Amino acid sequence: MELENKNKAQTDSDDCCSGDHAHQHKNSHEHSHEHDHDGHDHDHGNNGDQGLLQSRWMLWLSLAILLGTLAATFIFKIEIIRPVEITLMLIAYLLAGNKTILAAGRRIMRGDFFNEFTLMTIATLGAFYIGEFSEGVAVMIFYEIGELFQDLAVSRSKNSIKALLDIRPDSVTVIRKLKNVQTTPGDVRIGESILVKAGEKVALDGRLLSESGVFNTAALTGEPRPDVITSGKPVLAGMINTEKAVEIEVTALFKDSKLSRILEMVQDATARKAPTQLMISKLAKIYTPIVFLLAVLIIFVPYLFTPDYNFDQWLYRGMVFLVIACPCALTVSIPLGYFGGIGLASRNGILVKGANFLDVMTKIDTVVSDKTGTLTKGVFQVQQVETTMNEADFVQLAASLENYSTHPVAKAVVAFAAEQRLDKPAQVEELSGLGLKGIVNQKLVLAGNLKLLEKFAVSYPPSLSDIPETIVAVAVDGTYAGHFIIADEIKEDAAATVSELGKMGIETIMLSGDKQAVVNSTASRLNIAKSYGGLLPEDKVRVVEQLKAEGRRIAFVGDGVNDAPVIALADAGIAMGALGSDAAIETADIVIQNDQPSRIVSAIRAGKVTRSIVYQNISLAMGVKLAVMIMGAGGIATLWEAVFADVGVALLAILNAFRIQGRKI
């Protein structure tokens, strides 16, 4: 679906350290694309950890040669003649660093000299030049091991997001010509019927043909509680049939199912970069040339001031400086933090369509929410019964007559009398815009609004006119008998959500197309100070524009087609996914799958946890690197310490990023 008011942002990333050419806008909701052309590709999602480890057999052989040589020299005291040592170290060096060396060559041929591959190649060749063969090989080996750990971490992080939701069955049983045929979900057409046995996953969206079924909806809502679905109601791909076999009529193609769209959203999310990622990528393009320049200055400037200048000594210090200065660990650990944040949100039933929206949620100071279907269930329910008769008799008479109507208000009355036996009314007449008139148990019953009673000259208490909610007034044999107060039911966690947002310093404002009196009543029950009723879609846009003009950072939460324009306008657009319209879901930046308002708070917490981890990684990496760079330039740190510091920082940052996975929000 093409979305208005959305600017395209496309990211082209060559590698983790040489920077990304990215253009990002506040309202950029389109897809970004990443490419890794040289060296190490940090996405091995389909190979698995074992395949990735096996593919680096040359690295392990190189490590074995290095360890064997060091053991022979320092443990067994075997003197290895220089030509043999040089040959062994050269073989080990080429086995470990061939990809990095070739990547550096390709980059230089393209005019891109300042990148991590060139940096590591120059540093290790410098070590060879001054005769530190084992240290040069060790730098390359441990650099490659660090890259391998990063590859594994990125692979696992991306796979955890994909595995979280990719539960689509590979085959489906379709009923054709009264026979059960096994086929792939992609071959099933709209209108065909599929059979889902107990314990099987539903492969396609559809509506239930069987009388009823019990389904586990955890994949879509984040909650494992069973959901009873009756005939004619929608069933979504990804649900698990927990009891008897059921038949479902397919209403959407495999590629158009809600679950397929959810998967696409999550996969696209990992490509959208947060401002922190973009900042680090841009800094890397400046940082790497500066590092090269400083290394050159460390090597040659002392010649001007040191009487006993030793080129090999200062070259070594320059090489140490280059090794520790490599920014790759920093630029990989930051995306890992955001991958973890997206995964954390997904496990809690929240789909975040990009890392940038995790950052946006940390800055929100106002949540503007639609009423119906967002803070309320969008289902009419009897809230109160007032009658001058026996209540059971009153409910039975009114519900028997209302059972004739299909109006949502009438259905609410019938649902309220679900446990009572209803009589069949006679001479039923539906009066447009007023209500119903009919004979029930030989009594003339009127059920409808106050205008209906006025039409038949039935007097009623004047106080009824002051009730803000919808009422069903009932008269029996020409006399007022009582009334039902009908209202949309507030969601169980709505009040707690408003309260929690208030504790976080975030104001909640409610907008609705419903009449102001009803909106005020709902706002009062939820302790919302500001509420606006009687709004058309363009009025909602106007209100949000006014709030933004005041400098507020706004998250708008809605579920209907009429909410799509406001969702697009807000800093963060949030859609209720289970009951929400396709337009709202497609336009939104964040989708709450189980329709619980409390997930708004969870989304904000996920953003704050992610930001905290990312900032910790930046501080850790920059602090350690700066300290070792100073030590290297001063001749205190060796190449061994430099490479262990570089790999160690990378591992600590990766482990820190993985802490997100276990956080509770």
Image (cartoon, grey):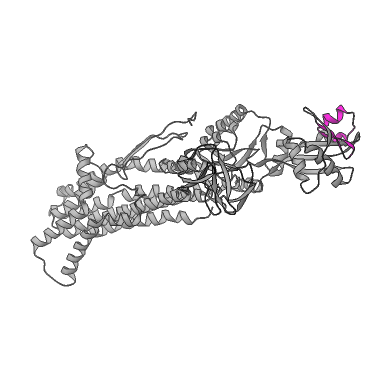
Percent of width and height locating residue 231: 64, 44
Left or right, residue 507 beside residue 268 = right
Tell whether position 645 is magenta. no
Residue beneath the point at 39% across and 47% down: 335
**Residue in the foreground of this view, choosing between 325 and 7:** 7
Left or right, residue 189 beside residue 83 = right
Tell whether position 461 is magenta. yes
Residue beneath the point at 54% across and 33% down: 583
**Residue in the foreground of this view, choosing between 160 and 121:** 160
Residue 498 seen anywhere in this rendered image of the structure? yes
Q: Given the current orientation, which residue lies at the most extreme bottom position?
A: 76
Left or right, residue 445 beside residue 222 = right
**Residue in the foreground of this view, choosing between 254 and 46:** 254
The answer to whether 319 is drawn above or below residue 513 in the figure is below
Residue beneath the point at 26% across and 46% down: 39
* Chain part drawn in magenta: 435-463
